[in-house]
Amino acid sequence: MNPEPFLQLDRVIHEKGRLAIMSLLAASPELSFTEMRDTLNMTDGNLTAHMRTLQEAGYVAVTKEFHSGRPLTTFALTGPGRKAFTNYINLLEQIVEQNRQK
Amino acid sequence: MANDWATEHLQVIRTLMERAAIYRRALAPVMLLTGSIGLLAAILGWSFKIDSPRSFVGYWTSISLLPLVGSYLMVRRQSLKDAEPFWSLPTRRVTQALLPPLAVGFIASVISFFHVGTAEANIANVIGKLWLPIGWIILYGCALHAAGFFMRRGIKLFGWIFIAGGCGLFALGIPDVPRPLYAHGVMGFFFGVLHLAYGTYLYFTEKAKNEA
């Protein structure tokens, strides 16, 4: 088996929680903190920690605003984030394909 | 082994992407609101003898706007309560799916409203109080079915009940029962009783799921 696709997998995205976050954001232009927390059944702290890592990697953009006097935090994938996610899926598909050919 | 986890990862990604695009706001209150308005409107329409084809069409067209506006206000209230954006992608998709059949129903109602007043009495009665309500039921079923692609639960099946029910009524032809009672009765049953029954079912299944 060629180990190259596996070695190229983005470690930031490869973590289970962050992969879930990236998947949700890839399917939606933006999602609020509560939408993501409830969909993924994560704690506030867990989600915040993962979001910080993704933000530091430049994969996720955060918008903070007020709606009817209440704070609303929304997240969206950045261009590099979408590219990294697409690349990650392509590598996974390569791995599946490689093993199918064996 | 590597194949297994890679396949699993891809499956998880697919599931989560689908979940992000599905409308998740509570349906039970919306169904109960629509059902209550539908049933009450049917009782009032029959009690106050809204019998002429024109008044029947005008009455039910106006009534149909109430649950529509009410539902969006409820959804907005819920999104504010949960600190979520109201005009989310799933909400937009559901609205886009609902729009064409509902718009056709509304346009047909407006055209009928102006034409039944000048048509011959029997024709006006059949169009205004028989075919138009059947058309509304079928189009509403189509709207629910289309929206069902972006919603959980049995919305598509609920839509099929309306489509099948409407086609069944059309196949039955012109009934012998007094027409105002029949017309308001049909509207009350489909837009009142069926919605109340589905809303009650959703309410209890949702509650049971939350308690589990």
Image (spheres, rainbow, N blue to C red):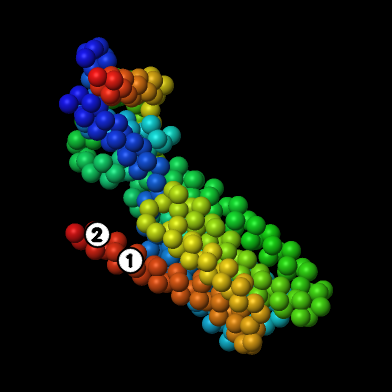
Could you say where residue B65 lies in the image, as x and y percent from the top left?
58, 64
Residue wearing tag 2: B209
The residue under label 1 is B203
Give the chain letter at badge 2.
B
Left or right of B67? Residue B209 is left
Q: Which amino acid, mark 1?
A: Tyr
Point out residue B116 in the picture as x, y percentages from the top left corner: 76, 73
Residue nearest the viewer, comparing B31 with B122: B122
Tell whether B143 sits left or right of B210: right
* Residue A53 visible in the current orientation: no
Mark 2 vs mark 1: which is more N-terminal? 1
Q: Are marks 2 and 1 in contact (CB under 8 Å)?
A: no
Characterize the local packing of mark 2: few (<14), some (14-19) or many (20 or more) Cα atoms within 10 angstroms.
few
Compared to residue B26, the image places residue A37 above or below, namely above
For the C terminus of chain B, which image quadrant?
Answer: bottom left
Q: Is residue B169 left or right of residue A18?
A: right
Nearer the observer, B174 or A83: B174
Of residues B172 and B121, the one drawn nearer to the viewer in this rendering: B172
Q: Residue A76 appears in which quarter of the rendering?
A: top left
Query: Looking at the image, which residue is at 75% across and 76% down?
Result: B124
Residue B207, compared with residue A60, is above or below; it is below
Residue situated furthest front in the rendering: A102
Quadrant of residue B18 within the rendered picture: top left
Q: Residue placed at 24% from the left, 58% from the top? A: B210
Q: Amino acid at mark 2?
A: Lys
Dot 1: element: helix
Q: Residue at x 23, y 12 (%)?
A: A2
**Residue B17, label in figure:** none
Foreground: B37 or B162? B162
Residue B13, visible in the rendered structure: yes
**Rendering coords of residue B185 (x, y %):** 55, 80
